[in-house]
Amino acid sequence: MPQAQHTLEALLWDVDGTVAETERDGHRVAFNQAFEAAGLPWHWDVAHYGALLEVTGGRERLLADMATRGDAPHRAEDREALARHLHALKNERYARLVEAGAIAARPGVLEVMREARAAGLRQAIVTTTSRSNVQALFARLLGDDWAAGFEVVCCGEDTRRKKPDPEVYLLALQALGLVPAAALAIEDSTPGSQAAGAAGVPLLLRTSVYFHDDGLPEGVVGWLCPPDAPIDLALLRRVHAELGRVTAQA
């Protein structure tokens, strides 16, 4: 029996790589500054950090990297303590980079957010980065009252499992009181796409620097948007409608 189509009611925004190219020029730089502040001779170059992005979450990324280093603490509890310390330092440095204007929004993103708000479309932030990182970036890009434009803000502190697990999407949908088909996820990466897909949320995948060669993961209902292609609210509505037709016919 064909499934009913749903009108687009909410946009669910990923943050890192989706709203801004934060990974290469923001988080990576801030991690290196944290290493220096902690007196560690570690440095993550562009290629190495790209490989580390297969691990979701900054603290988890640190632990994965330490597992390969002979000069990292040997005991698991010591590595965990160092990872938490470095992650806190990194977040401080990241906030400073954002405040200095080192990270700009990707083309069209802020315009879509403003269009959606003016049209009465609900919006949520669905990320597993830290709340402090979200606050720093959005306050810089949208002003101190940025949170007024988002009905729900789900961050890494709100979940037990990071993307590609769908937990953060399911949490946002529950808070919004919506079925997955009534929302559209905007993501840039394979883990994010997998998380949206596992939650049953239609997806617009606009790949970022580190994921520019990636396509839609197998089994995910989504629309692949070239990184430099313009986006606006009309496009997002068309994408959601087309994906709804595909799902209804399945």
Image (cartoon, helix red, strand yellow):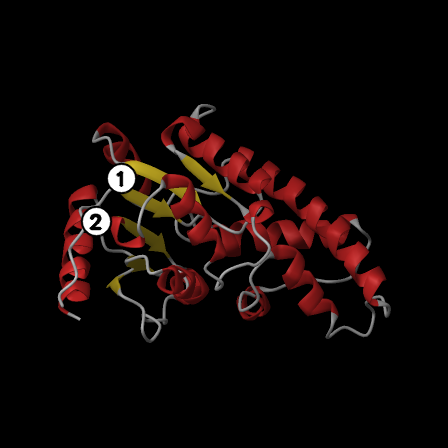
The residue shown at (60%, 46%) is 157
Residue at image location 68% in from the left, 61% down from the top: 62
Residue extending furthest toward the top: 145
Residue 13 image label: none
Residue placed most toward the observer, 83 or 150: 150
Question: Badges 1 and 2: C-beta atoms under 8 Å apart?
Answer: yes
| Residue on which disc 2 sits | 236
Picture layout, residue 246 above or below residue 68: above
Look at the image and tell me in which quarter the N terminus lies: bottom left
Q: Give the amino acid at mark 1.
A: Val
* Viewer-nearest residue: 40 or 239: 239
Image quadrant for the C terminus?
A: bottom left
- The reply, left or right, for residue 246 in relation to residue 217 is left
Residue at figure coordinates x 48%, y 52% from the top left? 168
Q: Position of residue 224 (x, y in %)?
A: 26, 64
Q: Is residue 19 visible?
A: no
According to the picture, the residue beneath numbered tag 1 turns out to be: 112
The spot of residue 38 in percent (x, y) is 80, 51
Give the residue type at disc 2: Leu
Q: Give the residue furthest to the front.
A: 1
- Element carrying mark 2: helix
